[in-house]
Amino acid sequence: MTVYMDNNATTSLRKEALDAMIPYYTDIYGNASSKFYKIGRDAEQALYKMRENVAKSIGAANVNEIYFTSSGCEADNWAIKGAAFANQAKGNHIITTKIEHHAILNACEYLEKHGFEVTYLDVDEYGCVSAEAVEKAITDKTILISVMTANNEIGTIEPIKEISEVAKRHKIIFHTDAVQAVGHMPVNVQETGVDMLSLSAHKFHGPKGAGVLYIRNGVRIDNLIHGGGQERGKRAATENLAGIAGLDKALELAVAELGKNTAHMKKMRDRLIEGIKKNIPYCRLNGPEDERRLCNNVNFSFQYVEGESILMMLDMKGVAASSGSACASGSLDPSHVLLAIGLPHEIAHGSLRLSVSEDTTAEEVDYIIEVLPPIIQRLRDMSPLYEGVAKGDK
Ligand SMILES: *Cc1c(COP(=O)(O)O)cnc(C)c1O
């Protein structure tokens, strides 16, 4: 049996999205900037329709507020660096959190080397940042606030609307990384009032290499990619029409099916959480255990074991999972998110992220609950730390 449980890392491409992409590889291969012949104009018109549809899907008031990018990482980098450099005359202070994706954290670190000052806010034990903490951190030099809508490692949903109101009150640009949120909870830029929002197609069953940065009209932001006049002169590069078509179709369906899909994912998530808690001692669920948890995320720490060893043994059983985030694997540091919620290093090291999708079945969940306990037990049996525990010492 093979079970894919790493949907926070990426998802499968859904059939409808693939079907929507094919024509742009075969028939409509024109450059959307070539206006003097039909095949170019066809591409341009298709692009306009897709932009319009994406705007509708996230509740944007204006089609011109949608900018297509190559990824979530690009959208995040553009938002942070673009807004920082464009608003430098007003101030040099940025507020973000300790649990952001590395696309945000490393972009902020880069800006620190270029004269900007960044406040990385603490989160509580569940990974929540409060609007009050954001407000307290504001100075007369603050030009940008960036807080993610939902965390990719432990699934915490942040109070984006409240933070957005704080930002608005202080007339500061507010960006949110909604890459994990889209397709997994309602995302509407009018309702939350955010100024900029990042999303990425491959996290909701669209293709890899296609993202969006929503930029509210009136927000000043410098270019990240210089060159031609695409994306209304804000982002050079010939548009990835097939990718955008897949993004658009996957997004449209994710929004249409949101209620049904999130209900199913929550069921699978909770079945997994209950099963693990019941069958494995000395474990801890990371992230909130209420409506503030993303519908598809499960993250546990198991004492006395190494996350990477769990992954290898799960792989032998056909299970794809993650320890922390895919970007962080390969490094020996424990996840910055798990450290930020206060886990000691040795416990953060023994963590496992299992993330379900709308396609996950109860049989797959039950298979994990069957194979995981003996894996943890085997690893603990090899651990000198656990030996004492098993014998009943402190
Ligand atoms: C996956 C992810 C990204 C990066 O998106 P890519 O399209 O893979 O570059 C950014 N932020 C979060 C929260 C993510 O989960």
Image (cartoon, rainbow, N blue to C red):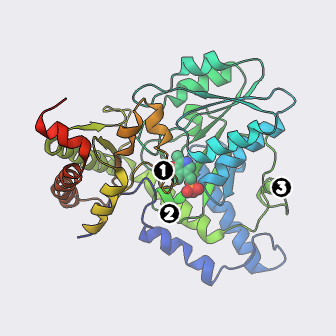
Q: Is residue 177 above or below residue 46?
A: above
Q: Which residue is mark 2?
A: 206
Gap in angstroms between the C-alphas marked 1 and 2: 31 Å
**What amino acid is labelled 3 in the image?**
Gly
Q: Can the viewer see residue 179 in this picture?
A: no
How many residues crowd around disc 1 within 10 Å: few (fewer than 14), some, or many (20 or more)? few
- Residue sitting at the far right: 89
In the rendered image, the quadrant that contains the N terminus is bottom left
Gap in angstroms between the C-alphas marked 3 and 1: 42 Å
Query: Residue 335 location in percent, x, y?
Result: 47, 43
Position of 86 with respect to 3 (left or right) is: right
Q: Is residue 146 above or below residue 178?
A: above
Position of 33 with respect to 246 (left or right) is: right
Residue beneath the point at 31% across and 49% down? 265
Q: Which residue is mark 1?
A: 332
Query: Residue 379 location in percent, x, y?
Result: 24, 53
Residue beneath the point at 81% across and 74% down? 34
Residue beneath the point at 64% across and 19% down? 137
Q: Which residue is mark 3?
A: 233
Position of 394 with respect to 39 (left or right) is: left
Q: Nearer the viewer, residue 244 or 357?
A: 357
Q: Is residue 336 above or below residue 169?
A: below
**What amino acid is labelled 2 in the image?**
Gly
Q: Is residue 171 above or below residue 60?
A: above
